[in-house]
Image (cartoon, rainbow, N blue to C red):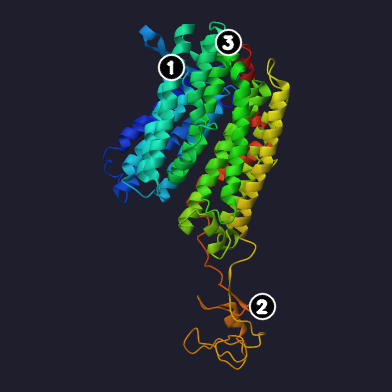
Amino acid sequence: MTVIDISPSVMQFLLAFIVVGPLFGAVAALLPAPPGLKGRNPDQAVLRHGVTVTGAVLIAAIVLAVGFDHDHPATMQATTDISWIPALDVRIHLGIDGISLPLLVLTALLTFLCALYSYFKPPAGPSPKAFVALVLVLESGTLATFAVLDLLLFFLAFEMVLIPMYFLINRWGGDQRQAAAWKFILYTLLGSVVMLLGLLLVGLKSGTFDMVALATDNGRGLTTSVQVIAVLAIGLGLAVKTPMWPLHSWLPDAHTAAPTVGSVLLAGVLLKMGTYGFVRILLPAAPDGMRTFAPYLAAFAVVGIVYGSLACLALARTGAKGDLKRLIAYSSVGHMGFVLLGIATMTPTGVNGALFANIAHGLITGLLFFLVGAVKDRYGTADLDTLAGATGAALYGRAPRLGALLAFAAVASLGLPGLAGFWGEMLTLFGAYSPAEGLSRPAFRTFMAIGAFGTLLTAAYMLIVVRRVCMGEHALPARTIPDASAPSAPSAPSAPSAPDTPQAPATPGTPQTPAATPASAASPTPGTLQAPPTPGTLQAPPAPQLADVQPYEAAAWTPLVALTVLAGLWPAVLLGLTDPAVQKLLSGGKS
């Protein structure tokens, strides 16, 4: 069933445009703006250019999804297959199925929302020309990763995103940005070198680099020892990008230093490239090797779930000086652990759960990083202790709509039923309860129990964040003054509570006395200490209001909120696409 009947040639053109269009847009961004399109200044023109190009790519992705044959999601559609390097049998092979289509649309959506957000809130740093060009190159590489069906093209697209993200962190990031950028590039490049060796091993030993042919062969052309080596090498590179514990340490630094849109794209789409590689390449092409390493992959996954949650709890506690962006980054380690656990089960239930959790994490964590960036812009810091107490007011009281959105994203992230985060975690745990044949059921049920415990830890730190940032601490700090009930108080001339002692005026001509008028009590002069109900303490007056959600912020965040609710209430939208494709992938190309 297709919503609109679109010819195969048009579908091919749309997919090619989605992959290549952002590259042409990146080149155009570096050129001078044509007359009549410069706007108020060149910076505005290039930012508007970014919105235009990413918007066109998003429209093409939506049309592609509308023209997709939903009755046959396991069949590769909109395919292009052109010989590129005949000597190595490398082909420009593009195509989409029910596994790659949701990731393609998610990438186009998040990149457009980031471009729209940056148009109204440009990141502090060098000229926007380079910023827009890098974002477009990053989008092209990510989209190509999900669309190509050749192992060497997959590697090129996989590596294509590293340089743009490095410069986005290094040039437009915050504190410690250079160290974070170097850590990001070194970790991912080292993992990629090992991954390339594994990809070459699979291609040369099987006689083809075509991912569809490898999936159909289902590992029959590779010996078990070759499969084990290939899974170890390719899996290492994919695990770094995912990121899997203990190869995750680059992620918190990168997220903390990256600009807001960099964090959104890094969490929303770049992390999905690693897990997509596990599903698209290793599960169908090297099933025996995956079966060997599946228990270890599951063990690392559940350790990551618990470790990420404990790290978040440590950052969230009072007095820890935890950074809210860093906390959300560590939460990604836990959430991606659920994705890896689902893949390790090697069952349709677990893999579908992993793919669902991929999309849910992109929507929810992308929204969280948008919101944390907005909070940091308003407060000037993402320090949790400052957000919770030192400002003297909670987010609900200062920017209620922003506080409500942050609370919504937090409860979605903890897996509240009815929102997108719930289904992915539940399906991965179900998959671990009954893993694929040949895997240890007691071991995987132990992993399931540990993962379920991780969901409780996730709920704990997310609720702590909501309480501290949105609701405030239990009690605001107060200053102690001499108590009027003490014996020496009446004779102390400076005791504020003595009835016969006038107060120093806070405003010329306006004495501050215990018998102050109701109007003056309701509207204190900023900086004036009011007599509290409890004798002996003074509290600071309420902090001023912050700017609440702006129209451009609402435009960037509303689609993520709506899709989080839609995927939570109607999971068949995603599962109807992924399940037939997963069934075919795990059965060796048989629908």
- Quadrant of the image occupied by residue 396: bottom right
> The N terminus is located in which quarter?
top right
Residue at (37, 50) in percent of width and height = 124
Q: How many marks?
A: 3
Who comes first in sequence, dot 3 or dot 1? 1
For image coordinates 53% across by 7% down, the residue present is 222
Q: Residues within 10 Å of mark 1 (few under 14, many from 20)?
A: some
Whichever of callouts 3 and 2 sits on the residue coming sooner in the sequence is 3
Q: Nearer the viewer, residue 20 or 315?
A: 315
Q: Which residue is mark 2?
A: 533
Circles 3 and 1 in contact, beta carbons < 8 Å: no
Q: Which residue is mark 1?
A: 197
Q: Give residue 48's position: percent from left, percent from top.
A: 37, 44
Q: Residue at x 57, y 64 (%)?
A: 393
Residue type, numbered disc 2? Pro
Judged from this view, the residue extending furthest toward the bottom is 500
Res 49 visible: no
Secondary structure found at label 1? helix
Does residue 232 show up? yes
5 and 65: which is toward the camera: 65
Distance CA(mark 2)–CA(mark 1): 72 Å
Residue bearing mark 3: 218
Mark 2 element type = loop
In the image shown, does 112 or 280 lie closer to the viewer?
280
